Amino acid sequence: MLVQEKRNRPLQNRAIIPAEPHYAAGFRAKHISSAKIQGYIYISSHSLGSVGLSLCQIPGHEGCLVFGQIKGKSCVFMQGRFHLYEGYSLCKVTFPMRIFKLMGVETIVVTNASGGLCQDFKVGDIMVIKDHINLPGFAGQHPLCGPNDERFGIRFPCMSDAYSKDLRKLVLDITAELGYSNFVREGVYCMVSGPNFETIAEARMLHILGSDSVGMSTVPEVTVAKHCGLRVLGLSLITNKVSLDYSREEKVNHEEVLQISKMRAEMLQNVLLTFIARSHQVETINNSNCIYSNAV
Ligand SMILES: O=P(O)(O)O[C@H]1O[C@H](CO)[C@@H](O)[C@H]1O
Ligand SMILES: Nc1nc2[nH]cnc2c(=O)[nH]1
């Protein structure tokens, strides 16, 4: 996840009160108060292990935070993320968003791998997320459930514009200029909890509900990021086609997801590097920051 972070802004050591304080305490003490963001690249799965990030146990999710400068802009990268299906509370899954907010980050770029429900989508397409469906949220699995922390945002946040229109336009312009238009789409991402891939009946239902792609992440992070006033760009790589048809024989598996992610990695990097370089074109970003999460 690529986060843009405001330049020359000191880290703020404000108190954070998450549901599980011991987790936050370790995280903050080891990383937030001691790391020097400006021009500093931080890659250490070993020390991250002592504070919980290496608890990312999914192949393809490195469990590292990387700080650095790209095109003169300060960035922090989350290599990997936490998932609900790993057994983490949504408070933990989304905790990095609040840390980034306190660090001065203004813009979040979330990436993920997902299955294509829209029948026009092909494997390898990049879907610019224009909206999402929070399916676990309908059943009370929502990262903002519980007492609202007013320091971050309001009790009843608007979600109709979770994905910035300006950032979507910028990234669509960039992909067109890079000659990628024939595999770039826009669409609605639906989150399910996982860890199993969909049954055909479930896939049909999600499709009827208006989902263009389905995955097991992103929505909690975006919800919390939007709640605390961060701008969000979401990119979803279609790693497999989700079967809506009982006669189809193909079966999705995680290896396929990893393989397609690898195949498109360079192109996604090109898009993001250009996005960071050009982010000043979107007025609201100012001359600051970005984040990138390489989902898988
Ligand atoms: O959403 P990300 O983390 O990109 O990964 C997607 O790919 C994994 C399944 O292969 C699941 O974790 C799913 O959510
Ligand atoms: N739920 C779900 N997550 C995915 N992540 C990558 N592909 C898929 C998929 O087909 N379904």
Image (cartoon, rainbow, N blue to C red):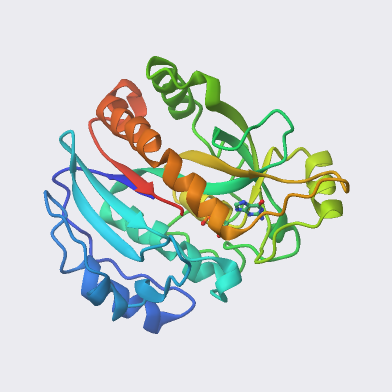
Residue visible at 30% across and 63% down?
64
Task: Tally the numbered discs.
Answer: 0
Using the rendered view, name the quadrant where residue 253 is placed.
Answer: bottom right
Would residue 180 appear left or right of 40 to someone viewing this image? right
Q: Position of residue 257 (x, y in %)?
A: 55, 52
Q: Position of residue 209 (x, y in %)?
A: 81, 42
Residue visible at 36% across and 66% down?
63
Residue visible at 75% across and 58% down?
138
Q: Is residue 98 above or below residue 121?
A: below
The single residue placed furthest to the front in the displayed view is 249
Query: Do we see residue 230 in this rendering?
Result: no
Q: Is residue 65 above or below residue 232?
A: below
Query: Do we see residue 69 in this rendering?
Result: yes
Q: Position of residue 260 (x, y in %)?
A: 51, 45
Q: Is residue 168 above or below residue 227?
A: above
Q: Nearer the viewer, residue 254 or 288?
A: 254
Residue visible at 73% across and 49% down?
250
